[in-house]
Amino acid sequence: MVEGSREHYTFQGPAVLLPELSAGSITDSLIEENYYPVMPISLGLTVTGNSGGGTVTELLTTSAAAYSKLAGFEMTSYERENGDIAGPFALAVSVDTADDGKIV
């Protein structure tokens, strides 16, 4: 995962992400105290629709300028290349279910 927006990475390396925090019971205290998670070498998730058995909420997200390197951990460059997958991506999610925590 590479972040294309300079405001969303740190330590001079676009693979050390500073994701956006979305409001929620897990993240509210972090937001209130102005904490910023640092996420080196992350994998992005694409959340589409709902599972039918629960609700998925994106808690940490990249900017729209992020992209997933097709080469994965074997990447040799942070530059965007043909085949890289365009963002934005979820980096952390919560799943709320109506079935006592069971997802089928």
Image: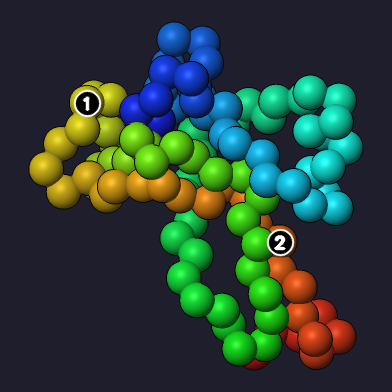
Residue 26 in the image, given as x and y percentages of width and height = 82, 49
Query: How many residues crowd around disc 2 within 10 Å: few (fewer than 14), some, or many (20 or more)?
Result: some
Q: Identity of the amino acid at label 1?
A: Glu
| Quadrant position of the C terminus in the picture | bottom right
Query: What residue is drawn where x is 58% and y is 82%?
Result: 51
Q: Which mark sits nearer the N-terminus, 1 or 2?
A: 1
Q: Residue at x 50, y 76 (%)?
A: 49
| Occupied quadrant, residue 78 | top left
Crowding near the residue tagged with mark 1, few <14, some 14–19, many ≥20 C-alpha atoms within 10 Å: few
Q: Is residue 73 visible?
A: no
Q: Is residue 26 left or right of residue 8?
A: right
Estimate the x, y position of residue 58 in percent, counting from the top left.
Answer: 62, 56
Q: Give the side of residue 49 with respect to residue 30, left or right.
A: left
Three-letter amino acid code at the position of disc 2: Ser
- Residues under numbered marks 1 and 2 in contact, where contact means CB atoms less than 8 Å apart: no
Regarding residue 58, the answer to whether it shows in the image is yes
In the displayed structure, does residue 94 sit left or right of residue 81?
right
Secondary structure of the residue carrying numbered label 2: strand
Residue 28 location (% of width, % of height): 83, 42
Residue on which the image places disc 1: 79
How far, Cα to Cα, is label 1 from label 2? 31 Å
Quadrant of the drawing holding the N terminus: top left
Q: Residue at x 48, y 20 (%)?
A: 7
Q: Which mark is residue 94?
A: 2
Res 54 quadrant in image:
bottom right
Residue name at image x 66 percent, y 39 percent: 21
In the foreground, 54 or 101: 54
